Amino acid sequence: MVGAGPVGLLLTALLQSVEGLSVRLYEKRREYTRTRMVQLAPYLVADSVESYRADSIDGDSVEAIFDPPELDEGLAFRQAIPSDLSTLLKSWVLGFCPLNSIEQSISDLIDSRGSDGVERTAGVVTAEDAMAMLQPGDVLIDSTGNRSLLRDHLVPGSRGADEGANTLNVRLEYALVITFLYGQPYDCNEYCKYYKNIENAHYKFIPMVHRTHYDGSVSHVTGIVNISADDYEAMPSRFDGEWLRGNVPGVAQSMDRFIDKIKQETPGEILGDLEIVRIPLDLYRARNATSRQLLTVGPIDHPFARSPVFLAGDSAIGSPYFQSISLGFECAIFLAGLIAQRDLPLRDMLDRYELHIYKQWLRVYMRSKMIKHNKDLFESLDDPLALLEKLHIY
Ligand SMILES: Cc1cc2nc3c(=O)[nH]c(=O)nc-3n(C[C@H](O)[C@H](O)[C@H](O)COP(=O)(O)OP(=O)(O)OC[C@H]3O[C@@H](n4cnc5c(N)ncnc54)[C@H](O)[C@@H]3O)c2cc1C
């Protein structure tokens, strides 16, 4: 396993308890220090098909894309998760939590189960290292995130030289992800998003409904503001409220108006400063999420034609709008379920993982396009003609 981010760690913890397997886990970071807050989707701990489909945006897509036996199998894989790990998962779907504590808790869990079966190595792994390390019987999993180490190596003839050869990318928009802490309870729904932005003709701040979390004394609020490609180019990757005020006053004024309206409801103060990250919101997938093609067409001396390779997490699929970890976890649970079936022929394992990833891609593609479309409509709610131009009715 190369990459011990949340997905590589979850997969390691799942495979650690499979009899007859041992895991070598490589990670270049020496410690876990990420500061962002994330939310995991409740479908990750669903115990019935109904609860798996409970999401209001993609519940119907799930039914349309997956056949009933596939949904049943997904539930069975979920139910086989060891209880120490499923307890953690259940606690994370309850609210907004720090990514750092997700990473640290799974890492600690792996260590606390004893060193048997998992060997951890710190350091950067190159594609050449990964190829040289492979021994007969090994399975190589690339969980190195969106700049995947091996994605471009899975296309016959590419050998990693052709960047993007194996990636389908859809750029939905550019956005600022803005997070702040508020010293009072604050919750939000679609009406709230509308009324708090009513004077913001541009740069509406859209908190994600579940991204406002009150932890007893402080509300954590995260949301996004759509920006142009030119705005994006002119900004540093990360900055604070002061930089925003000095350089992009339009967004700062929009935030001020939004925050003033929160204060009118529940008199409180912003604690600390705004934390702002600018990101392109990309929806992408690896066209090949495994080494299946290399296995089929070779060349036969290629190390990946002899040992299977799987992409997991952001290596395989990436999506915006705060869904990506959940999707990565979902695919990791499925992959661990396949690998645990020790008598499953390799070819079937590769085919089934490819199909599963493709179906999860369809699901997240539709969900993301729907969210983007809804956001576009929302931006024009005060301008009926602009709104009508964005509607495709029949
Ligand atoms: C600002 C922001 C907010 C986000 N909020 C949310 C959210 O609310 N909900 C959500 O679902 N998602 C969110 N995401 C996305 C989420 O963080 C990712 O989907 C998730 O971290 C992906 O997990 P991963 O394990 O696949 O990859 P990563 O987290 O990227 O982990 C990859 C790991 O591999 C290691 N690595 C990479 N290359 C090598 C190498 N060559 N050798 C050794 N190790 C290597 C890295 O150090 C890293 O630890 C957010 C992302 C951003 C940027």
Image: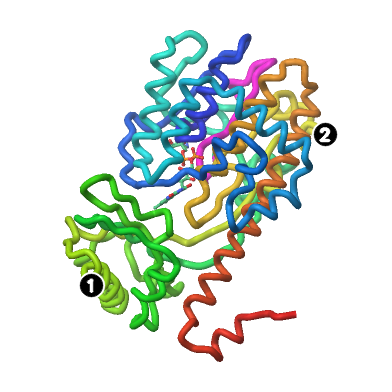
Relative depth, front residue between 218 and 246: 218
The residue carrying pointer 2 sits among few (fewer than 14), some (14 to 19) or many (20 or more) residues within 10 Å by Cα, namely: few
**In 3D space, how far apart are the residues under numbered discs 1 and 2 (Cα atoms)?**
61 Å
Mark 1 is on which residue type? Answer: Asp
Q: Residue at x 37, y 22 (%)?
A: 108
Look at mark 2 in the image and give the residue it sits on.
296
Secondary structure, mark 1, is helix
CB contact under 8 Å: marks 1 and 2: no
Relative to 289, say whether 201 is above or below.
below
In the displayed structure image, the side of residue 33 where residue 61 appears, left or right = right
Residue 57's x, y, as percent? 60, 58
Residue 44 found in image quarter: top right
Reply yes or no: does residue 142 show up in magenta. Answer: yes
Colouring rule applied to residues: rainbow
Mark 1 / mark 2, whichever is N-terminal: 1
* Figure quadrant, ligand 1: top left
The 10 Å Cα crowd at callout 1, few under 14, some 14 to 19, many 20 or more, is: some
Which contiguous range is marked in magenta? 132-148
Check disc 1 and report the residue beneath it.
260
Which image quarter is the C terminus in? bottom right
